[in-house]
Every structure is written in structure tokens, then in C-alpha cells.
Image (cartoon, grey):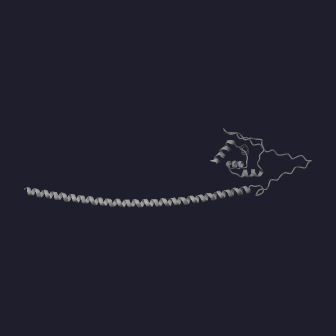
Amino acid sequence: MWEIWLAASVAALIIVLILHERSVRRRFKEAQAETRENRALDQKIVRLYREIEEMLDSFEAYVGEVHEELESRRNELLTMSRQATTLYMQVMQPGVFAPKPQVEEAPPPGEPPAPLDKPAKKEPRPSKKGETPAEEGKPSRLSQRDRAELDRLPGKGQKIRYLTGKGLTMSEVARELNIGKGEIRLILDLDKD
């Protein structure tokens, strides 16, 4: 009887060993498959990393090209702006497109001088807080040609820039445009920014 028991024990032990070996083999194969998958993933990651590096390098090269192109266009625009300013200054000289101002001849010694027409006074604009009313009573320093050019300009800002460019003081600009000094100061300060 003990022989049967021993044989059954040995058979059970063999069955356990066989099952254990199969389990170990299955786990080993799973580990190998997982290792292969990890290697494949690692290779994909390395490939993606290289592609990203190549894309970044090409992007940096593209940004460099765009920067150079923008810089060259900026320089072209600056050159064109300088040329336009030079042309404008040449055109605005008396005698180029507008006739030179005529100097009035003095009347003969025996005749009294002709009466000058008094210009109509502008009504002072009510001042806002922080503004001073424009000064009145002083003669204008603008020529007829400058006044005609001033009338052609569309906005207050352009008129203010034009008059200050002609060398008029803030008070004179305020008087010419009938606006307050605060508004002029604001527009000139905005130009500085």
C-alpha cells in the first residue's frame, strides 16, 4: 500500500513539476514578448525623437530665413521712407509745384498805402479741464502755401504734426487749429510712443 501511495505521490510530483515548467515557460515567453514590444517601442520613441529634432532644426532654419527676409524688407522700407521724405521736402519747396510767393511792391511815394483787410477773428473754443484757450491777436507765421497744404490734410493729428514740423510752437498750433494745448500735447505724446 505504501507503494501505491509512493507512486501516487511521485505521479503528483511529476504532474506538479510539469505544470510548473509549463507555467515558467509561459511566463518566460510572455516576458520575451514584452521585451520585444518594449524594444519596438524604444525604437519608435528613438525614431520619433530624431524626427522631432529634424523638424526643430528645419524650423530654426526657416525662422532664420524669415527673419533675414523681414530684416531686408524693413531696410527697404526705411530706404523708401527716407526717399519719400526727401522727395516730399523737395516738392514742398517754393517754386517746384506751387508758384513762389510774390512780394508786393511798395506804393509810389505820393500815394497812401492800401488798407489791409482785417482777418475775421475766430471765436475762442470753450476750454476743457486742463486745457488753456488758444492765444489770439498774434499774426500767423504760415504762408498761403502752408495754409493751403494744411487745409488738404484730413485729420487733426496730421495737421498738428505738419505745423510742429514747420516750427510752430504749441501756442501757435493751438491758435491755428483753434484747439487746446492739452489735445496737442496728447497727440504729440502718442507719437512718441
Residue positioned 27% across, 59% down in the render: 28
Q: Quadrant of residue 170?
A: top right
User: Is 32 placed above or below 183 here?
Assistant: below
Furthest toward the left, the residue is: 1
Furthest toward the right, the residue is: 110
Furthest toward the top, the residue is: 129
**Residue 158: percent from the left, percent from the top?**
68, 50
**Residue 79: percent from the left, percent from the top?**
65, 58
**Residue 70: percent from the left, percent from the top?**
58, 58
The tally of labels here is: 0
Residue positioned 39% across, 61% down in the render: 44
Residue positioned 22% across, 60% down in the render: 22
User: Is 11 placed above or below 130 here?
Assistant: below
Q: In which quarter of the image is residue 3?
A: bottom left
Is residue 51 shown left or right of residue 85? Answer: left
Is residue 122 shown left or right of residue 43? Answer: right
Quadrant housing the N terminus: bottom left
Q: Decide which of 164, 4 is in the foreground and name it.
A: 4
Is residue 34 shown left or right of residue 153? Answer: left
Is residue 28 shown left or right of residue 127? Answer: left
Q: Decide which of 144, 60 is in the foreground and name it.
A: 60
